Amino acid sequence: MSKKKIMFFLPALDVGGAERVTVNIIRYLNPNNYEIHLVMVQKKGLFLEHIPHYVTLHDLGVKKTMFSIFRLRKVIRKIEPAIIYSTLIRTHVAVYFALKNISHQVKIVMRMPSSPKLMMEEGSGNIINKFILTKALKKANIVVAQTPEMKDEIEFYYNVNRENVKVLLNILDKKNINKSIQNQTSPFDSKNINVVASGLVRHIKGFDTLILAFKEVYMKNKKFRLHIIGRDLNGQTVEYEKLVLSLGLEGIVSFLGYQSNPYRYYFYSDLFVLSSRREGLPNVVLENLYLNKPIVATRCVPFMSTIIQEGVNGFLVDINDAKSLAMAIINFKEIKKPTLYLSDKYSSIEDIF
């Protein structure tokens, strides 16, 4: 039986949620059934090390996704994939235009990286962008929503046929997680209560609110320490370090930068905190619950109330509410049974591909 050709398209393999999900899907697919191609605008990024050897990599060699359309079309004609998978707004648009004048039949799968409602509220969905994106999404055979709420938003804002929108929860690379915590030692001082937060260091992750909350946490209990894992793309860490100094939290709050094995930190932590202002579906929460870590998280996406059972596996607080965030962190030991509770009613990878 011949293998089905599938082409994934990304700007690069930088460290981000959409990229992480794509890598997990690639690693999940059976290479005996699929001939897997990964096309990148620029062949770079820290996640390159996680791409299996059997995946064929293609480097378009341009600086921006919008300049990649003609080269992308050429690669599509060369590969003749049965399926094209895109996971970012700009790659959706590029795929839409690249497929013009392509004669062979292609199944198009487009995953929404964030909540359309929040995108509109933040002004990132202007009229022209919304018009083009709507065209692209309507061209897709399947539009992947990360949550049921996102499915409703895709239908409402982009008028996409509801039957074409599938809810696929972010899959976990459990094999890699398990391997990553084997034979590891704790990076923390066991005398402390070690709290971990993780994500790209930028405003929407809410680390400023978390640092403000941690002042109160530390005042209540001097054993608490906060460790923030994440790559800084725009120099935001400098501002956060100034905030740490102004609050007298030097040595209490630390920035660990990018970690190739964050699971070691998750596994040995006492608590994981998600302070985000906006998310699609946070991989880090799913990963930490899989590792049986208690969670304190913001209500950054409605689906959080499905993932987090209040007082059972975590606590939920409002966005930008430093006081409530502090109290939840202080009281984290009241969390009874941290584990991952997910229904099996959603779509599977096999339903999508």
Image: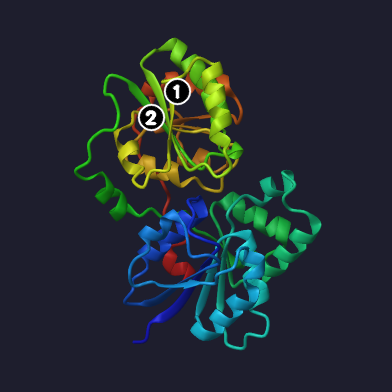
Cα gap from disc 2 to disc 1, whole angstroms: 8 Å
The amino acid type of the residue labelled 2 equals Leu
Q: Earlier in the sequence, mark 2 or mark 1?
A: 2
Residue at 53%, 73% in the rendered image: 84
Instruction: Name the outermost residue toward the left.
Output: 183
Please state which of residues 255 and 219 is positioned toward the viewer in this rendering: 255
Residue 238 figure quarter: top right
Residue at 60%, 51% in the rendered image: 114
Q: Is residue 145 above or below residue 308?
A: below
Residue at 27%, 19% in the rendered image: 191
Percent of width and height locating residue 37: 44, 74
Q: Is residue 267 above or below residue 208?
A: below
> Image check: 272 left or right of 98?
left
> Image check: 178 left or right of 104?
left
Quadrant (top left, top right, bottom left, bottom right) of the N terminus: bottom left
Tag 2 secondary structure:
strand
> Image check: 120 left or right of 142?
right
Residue at 38%, 45% in the rendered image: 287
Asked whether residue 157 is in view, the answer is yes
Q: Are marks 2 and 1 in contact (CB under 8 Å)?
A: yes
Percent of width and height locating residue 203: 60, 37
Q: Which residue is mark 1?
A: 329
Check disc 1: other Cα within 10 Å, few if <14, some if 14-19, many if 20+. Answer: many
Residue 189 figure quarter: top left
Please state which of residues 203 and 110 is positioned toward the viewer in this rendering: 203
Asked whether residue 324 is in view, the answer is no
Q: Which residue is mark 2?
A: 271
The amino acid type of the residue labelled 1 equals Ile
Percent of width and height locating residue 257: 44, 39
Percent of width and height locating residue 256: 41, 35
Tag 1 secondary structure:
helix
